[in-house]
Image: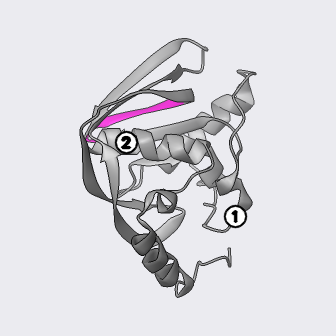
Amino acid sequence: MVMRDLRYFGDPVLKTVCDPVTKFDKKVEALVTDLMDGVKPAGRAGLAAPQIGVGLRVFSYDVGGLTGYVINPELVELSEETHEIGEGCLSVPELWFPVVRAKRAVVRGVDLRNEPIEVEGVDVLAQCLQHETDHLDGKLYLDRLTPERKKRALGEARGKDWFWKR
């Protein structure tokens, strides 16, 4: 298992809307394998393709014993009930801030055979589904922070070794 290098805050791929997968071939299969391998280490809940430098709509997840991936995911349902939940990101390491997220989320997409799949999550899995889909839309969780928290987060980020250096 070879882990692809992560992309960090400041890398343009993280702020770019990803293209849909249109060709289901060995390259996409290898991408899914890399994403599934990349989400395995402890402390990781999800990994989106742009976080490893690929501008395609694919992410993997591993939350509470539920592991999988979604190709061309779309958030199709968010509960009206929200909560503030601590959130971090592999592409913005060492920072955690409260973010308002829907308590329940449903994502629809396809698998490697281009067959429809649906993933429904509550609490942490719902947060993961929203967070990873945001990555595919060129958004980081920092974009969802209140202005005061975003200012604080950016200030803290500037003091980190990884900030715009990788």
Give the residue at x 49% y 39%.
60
Q: Quadrant of the C terminus?
A: bottom right
The answer to which quarter of the image holds residue 102 is top left
* Three-letter residue code for mark 1: Asp
Label 2 packing within 10 angstroms: few (<14), some (14-19), many (20+):
many
* Three-letter residue code for mark 2: Asp
Is 35 within the magenta? no
Identify the magenta region.
Answer: 64-70
State the CA–CA distance, disc 1 to disc 2.
25 Å
User: x and y percent of residue 95 in the render?
Assistant: 41, 72
**Most common secondary structure along the magenta stretch:** strand
Q: Nearer the viewer, residue 46 or 164?
A: 164
Whether residue 36 is visible here, answered yes or no, is: no
User: x and y percent of residue 134 in the render?
Assistant: 53, 45
Q: SS for tag 2?
A: strand
Give the vertical position of 135 relative to 129 (above or below).
below
Q: Nearer the viewer, residue 151 or 126?
A: 151
Q: Which residue is mark 2?
A: 62
Q: Residue furthest front?
A: 147
Task: State the scheme by which the image is colored.
Answer: one colour
Mark drawn on residue 11: 1
The answer to which quarter of the image holds residue 71 is top right
Label 1 packing within 10 angstroms: few (<14), some (14-19), many (20+):
some
